[in-house]
Amino acid sequence: DGGITQSPKYLFRKEGQNVTLSCEQNLNHDAMYWYRQDPGQGLRLIYYSQIVNDFQKGDIAEGYSVSREKKESFPLTVTSAQKNPTAFYLCASSLPTSSLPGANVLTFGAGSRLTVL
Amino acid sequence: GQQVMQIPQYQHVQEGEDFTTYCNSSTTLSNIQWYKQRPGGHPVFLIQLVKSGEVKKQKRLTFQFGEAKKNSSLHITATQTTDVGTYFCAEGENDYKLSFGAGTTVTVRA
């Protein structure tokens, strides 16, 4: 079955440590995204990538880094510079854009819940 | 980016009753999407609205896009316990960047 796999599902980190969240998709989608979800704040975009070897900052990119070396993979690193990293992280993907509106319908993974101790 | 405001933030509904949740913007929206996130789950796409005044139905759910394309609504009839969750609207700023509202969290009293 096609889908998005995020790992780990739960992660605990000590302050000052970097952690990397994995996101893999087999939907053949070109675009991939990372969102952060905090209670009562909806989803906020961290980074997105339209194509391999290219990515753009979202609304809250500070303290995070990404890479897009393969179409299927879009890992997110939460660095020690992120001041409040405890959150639920969601990876998503979408079809390539087209002249039709709505090409950016998102398919989400199950999420990774990061807790900083 | 453009922002969408969702009201109410919380909706407590008696099973069998109807309710409506709203998504508002101060600017014209290119399109609006709705997602549902069950407790402990991840958002799942429900519908996309593109045209002014568009109305789409999915069983007991009715989605509407305003004539001015500045607001959208989701109306659920005969609420069931399976409707529990958080409903998000999202606005497509461009082909890649979606901006999500804060969501309406729905609880159902049996």
Image (cartoon, coloured by chain):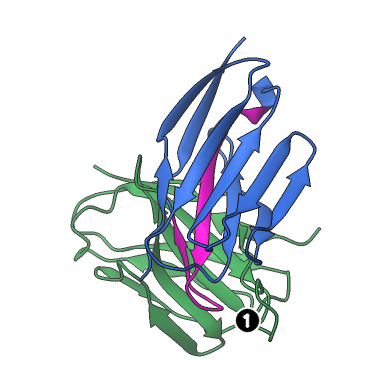
Chain colours: A green, B blue
The one nearer the camera, A27 or A114, is: A27
The one nearer the camera, B23 or A33, is: B23
Residue B34's spot in the image, x, y percent?
Answer: 59, 52
Q: Main secondary structure of the magenta part?
A: strand
Residue A63's spot in the image, x, y percent?
Answer: 25, 68
Q: Is residue B87 magenta?
A: yes
The residue shown at (77%, 43%) is: B58
Q: Is residue A22 above or below residue B19?
A: below
Q: Is residue A80 above or below residue A47?
A: above
Q: Quadrant of the C terminus of chain A?
A: top left
The residue shown at (47%, 38%) is: B104
The amino acid type of the residue labelled 1 equals Lys
Residue B72's spot in the image, x, y percent?
Answer: 55, 51
The residue shown at (75%, 33%) is: B60
Q: Would residue A35 be visible to someone looking at this image?
A: yes
Total residue callouts: 1
The one nearer the camera, B3 or A91, is: B3
Q: Quadrant of residue A5?
A: bottom right
Name the secondary structure under disc 1. loop
Give left or right: position of A108 versus A114.
Answer: right
Residue B2's spot in the image, x, y percent?
Answer: 38, 67
Q: Which residue is mark 1?
A: A71
Q: Would residue B42 be visible to someone looking at this image?
A: no
Q: Is residue B37 above or below residue B18?
A: below
Give left or right: position of B34 versus B46.
Answer: left
Residue lying farthest to the top in this orientation = B110
Q: Which residues are magenta?
A: B83-100
Q: Is residue B13 above or below residue B5?
A: above
Q: Quadrant of residue A21?
A: bottom left
